[in-house]
Amino acid sequence: MTSQLNKDNLPEHIAIIMDGNGRWAKAKNRPRLFGHNAGMKTMKKIVRASSDAGIKIITMYAFSTENWKRSPEEVDGLMNIAVEYFHKEVGELHQNNVKINVIGDLDGLGKKVREAAVKAMATTAENTGLVLNIALNYGGRAEILQAVKLLIAQGIAPEALTEAQISEHLYTKNQPDPDLLIRTGGESRLSNFMLWQMAYSEFIFTDIYWPDFEVASYYQMIENYQRRNRRYGSTE
Ligand code: FPP
């Protein structure tokens, strides 16, 4: 689908919580991993639609620091999906000038997925199109904590510490904060996602399960965002 979106006032950065894979699979009497595989296909579709629409950055929440609490089978399956994504998709993404940026604690990931992520980032490092942040082993509080630790280790004086310095020590350094957060799957919460960066983001929640999420709905949400009046605490 070619984007018919008005190019004025496009969100520069969209963050997405891809929720509902498990319930989508359950409704079909299939295993949870069937849902995650379907979710990966939706992710491919939405990344392409974002490039087409001229979005500059999207951040997709693929695996949180809390997701290790799931069954070993599901965790392994999700890691395998991530490896598959990096291996199979990087060619097309590279062709489309997409720059992959994995955010999260890479050191806490298994070797296979870490190496696949590092390779995908290296291959696409010079690309100038859509920036695709994939949050893997990501936690918002942990991200802020490591930023503060780095600043303390650099010997920063408390009175010299600024919000900008914290932003510059997050995984998203040099990127604008998300303008729009989309969460599928019916829950209305942040689940430890980009807590610092989303201070002024616009939120859209939908009951649609992630595997059923369509490009048409995505573009409607962007249009919804374009009609909003962001005031950042002021009155106009
Ligand atoms: C939340 O649904 C989804 C996840 C925890 C994983 C999201 C992963 C993908 C969409 C594909 C992975 C792609 C890469 C590159 C790793 P849920 O399982 O919490 O669903 P539920 O709330 O219905 O149980």
Image (cartoon, rainbow, N blue to C red):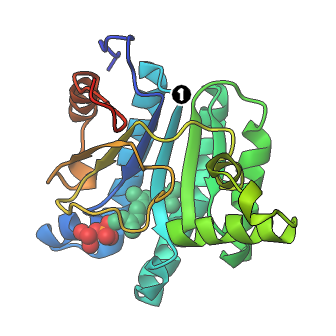
Of 77 and 160, which appears nearest the observer?
A: 160
Q: Residue at x 30, y 74 (%)?
A: 32
Q: Left of 127 or right of it: where is 180? A: left
Q: Nearer the viewer, residue 101 or 157?
A: 157
Q: Amino acid at mark 1?
A: Lys
Q: Position of residue 153 (x, y in %)?
A: 85, 71
Residue 23, picture quadrant:
bottom left
x and y, in percent, of residue 37 in the image? 38, 60
Quarter of the image that includes the C terminus: top left
Q: Quadrant of residue 22?
A: bottom left
Q: Is residue 48 left or right of residue 190?
A: right
Q: Secondary structure at mark 1?
A: loop
Q: Is residue 95 left or right of residue 4?
A: right
Asked if one can make out residue 48 in the rendered structure from this viewpoint, the answer is: yes
Which residue is rendered at x = 46% and y = 41% of the image? 178
- Asked if 176 appears above or below 20 in the picture, the reply is above
Q: Residue at x 79, y 45 (%)?
A: 122
- Residue bearing mark 1: 56
Residue drawn where x is 72% and y is 57% of the image: 161
